[in-house]
Amino acid sequence: MEVNNEGAGTSGTSINSHLDSYDSLHLKLKSLVLQIDKYLNLRTEDSALLIIKHLQALSMTIDVNIFDPKSPLGNKLYIGLYNLFTNIEPQSQMSWYCVDTISNACNNSSARQTLIHTYNFIPSLSRLLCDQLTCVKKKKLLKLIQDLSCGIKISWQIPHLPDLIATLTKWVESQDEEIICLSLGVLVNLCYKNLPAVYTLSKTVDVKKFLRFCLPFKGPIIEVHVCKLLMILDYMNLNIDKFELVLEKVITATFLSILEAFKNNDAILLRQSADFFLDVVNRNGNDRILEVYKKYEEDLTNLLQLADNSVSTSGDSGCSNNSNTPECISIVLEFIHSLMVQDLISASNLPLMITRLATGWVNSDWVSFQALIILTKIVDNLPEVEARTFRVGSSGRSREVEETDKKISQILISALPSFLLTWQTSVASSNVESCRRLGALLQLFRGMLQVPELRPSVCEMLTENLIAEVFIPLQTDNYVPILKSSSDGICTTDTVNTCLYAVSLVNDLAQHNSSWLGFLCTLMENKRVHMSIAQAMLKKKIATAMHTLQSLSSTKANKAPVPVETYCPVIPFAQMERLDDTLKQIKEDQNGVSSTSASQVMELYEYKIGRLAYEEKSALNNLEAATEQRRQLQNRLALITAEQNKMQQLLLRQEHNSEQASKLKEEFRNLYVKEQDEAKDALGKIKVYERILKTKDTALEHTQTRANELSKQIEELSDTLLKQRETLVTKEGIIKKLVDSGNKSEKNLRWVEENLKKTNLDNKNLNSQIVNIEEKLGLRDIQLAELKEQYQAAKNIIDTITKVAMRQDP
């Protein structure tokens, strides 16, 4: 079964609207912090109205990520709310808006843990508890106090504790079942592993009567609270038969409470019930639990089926409509893992169901780590199951275990793509949760390599490039190994552990495939890997040193206790003398107080009572002042821690920048030396080029002189050419005229020839006129001869001119 936790996707419009709403809430949060500071200094009505407006918006927001304590304004918000809560009237309207805002902040798991362990709002909330409240407000307050007291640690007598416990015990006797259940839940949270609260409860009410009053209550959750009180107050030292009946009732009620809390998606009650059951197991042993609680396997199967159904009905997102479902699944898987560690998972079908459930939540950010841990535990048990099957032989039980083993292996093989997706998302992210998830996945692969049926699939999926992605943080320049458990550090303990898990996985792969030996050798030659290994060894040495130091400190504390200064009220000198005489008489009289009057003894007793009452009152005042100072110091410590993380990041960045600057300086220095050498070489070349340039300049001067002379000659030739061209133009005009005259003569000659032809033709017809014509013809011949001479002379002239022109043309 696979669950796609990526979701169906959202459009760009919805993403933009979500970002806009987040920015709007961030601005309101920033404005609220400023207005709270302003209101605490000036107490203006405008600031009060703005504070109420912002508190209303934050109390109704659906996006609870705004309350994340790791956000830039997280610590300032909670400190501002704490200061506001402690400086306003308990029953004012603003107080209840603060209650609504803190209740909404508890929906964020990280914020709830911070509110429980860092910012103690319970004293301020306990001031609101009174009998005049309506049932709705009582339930709202009790629900919030129950959320904020889950897992609280009380190390001393807190001043508000007696009034709070007295109010809770009074409300347990009310008629409203929900108020009774919530009041018992708060009492259980306050008294669970907190001796000061137990002492306060024993001084406030008669514990035996109170438990006798609570025992008849019915209902799975109320019965669990009553059973928890029985365990906490150690009232279970009964005879064996009755003890087993009470133990069976405790376990039955606890399991019913777990199922009910999971159905209601109540993560806090689920966590309390699971922890309480594990406490019962630790107190009474595994074998006794299985003997007393006959329906253990049946109820555990029901719980797994219920969780499996929540996966199938959750859709693509991996969770139902209620946002607590992933947290509830995580608690269930953590609870089952604790049962497996206690060897309380004995049924053959349970590991198969657990495997199906865990593989369905591998890709969920919230549940993935617990799912991978529990799968690792199941894989580690597979060789033991195989060995047990081999020892048992061919019985029906062995065949059933073998079939279950095969089914688990098939589920794990089919889940390899999901594991690969988890690998890729964990490597791509840089937060601590992703690092822890990747470390758990590496341990799971190491366990799968030990199972012969799973080994080929794992070896086929894993590649050198895939595992090399784990070591990418080691290749960055800002890798600084520091022992730190928060996500503000560049390299945390989880990062070091993940690196070592990856090296161990490569070592396991190299044992089964020699092709991984080269990659393993490369890793072991990396200095950053050596730093990680040294970091892990240093962590172990630090833990040993701290343990030794703690032992030395406790030994010295036992040998030399710190003196406590007490104060006595001032009394008159005469009364002090009488008291001294009375003490002296009592000390000297062997028969006790036989010679001492009763009035003197009573006076001494009253004085002692008065002194003790004064000391108690003074101690309570000092305790209240110390508690308030502790809260203020704790708030300041939270701010200073946040600032320290920022400063540490700035310091690391500064060191990184300094290292980068040193590297750049060294590179610049080398570049400068290189450029200087190149400049010297270039200077030598420049001198050679200068000598060549001087030679070229001299040659250029000679060439320039020659060019000037040639220019003058060219100018002279140009003038001559111009004159010759003008002469040529004139001659061309004369030649053109002569050509025209020749053309006209040729035309005349042709006309004459034509006439001659006509004449010759006419001669045949004019024989009679031959004489006359011959005379005329003679004259004509003479004329023709003259014309020919003229023509020949003209032609000779033209030829002579042409030759002269051709001779003068260049």
Image (cartoon, grey):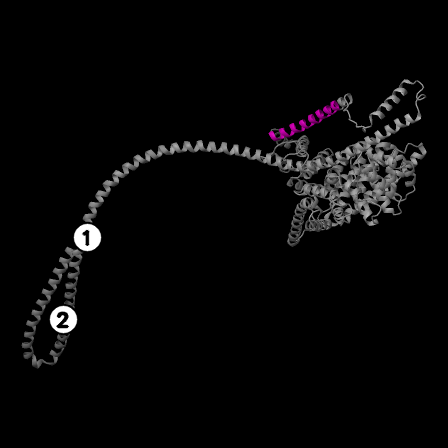
- Give the side of residue 434 with respect to residue 617, left or right: left
- Give the side of residue 700 with respect to residue 411, left or right: left
Counting the numbered discs, the total is 2
- Name the residue nearer the viewer: 804 or 156: 156
Q: Secondary structure at mark 2?
A: helix
- Quarter of image, res 563: top right
Q: Could you tell me residue 336's position as x and y percent?
A: 80, 38
Q: Could you tell me residue 699's position as x and y percent?
A: 25, 39
Tell me the amino acid under the disc marked 1. Answer: Ser
Q: Which residues are magenta?
A: 527-553
Using the image, determine if residue 308 lies above or below residue 678. below
Q: Secondary structure at mark 1?
A: helix
Residue 327 belongs to magenta span: no
- Give the side of residue 418 with respect to residue 347, left or right: left
Q: Could you tell me residue 374's position as x and y percent?
A: 76, 37
Magenta stretch secondary structure, dominant: helix
Label 1 crowd bin: few (<14), some (14–19), many (20+), radius 10 Å:
few
How far apart marks 2 and 1 lie (CA) works out to 45 Å
Mark nearer the viewer, 2 or 1: 1
- Name the residue nearer the viewer: 391 or 532: 532
Instruction: Point out the image quarter for the N terminus.
Output: top right
- Res 749 label: 2
- Give the side of residue 340 with respect to residue 503, left or right: right
Tell me the amino acid under the disc marked 2. Answer: Leu
Using the image, determine if residue 721 lies above or below residue 238. below
Label 2 crowd bin: few (<14), some (14–19), many (20+), radius 10 Å:
some
Residue 628 in view (yes/no)? yes
- Name the residue nearer the viewer: 420 or 101: 101
Q: Earlier in the sequence, mark 2 or mark 1?
A: 1
Q: Which residue is mark 1?
A: 718
- Name the residue nearer the viewer: 732 or 776: 732
- Quarter of image, res 184: top right
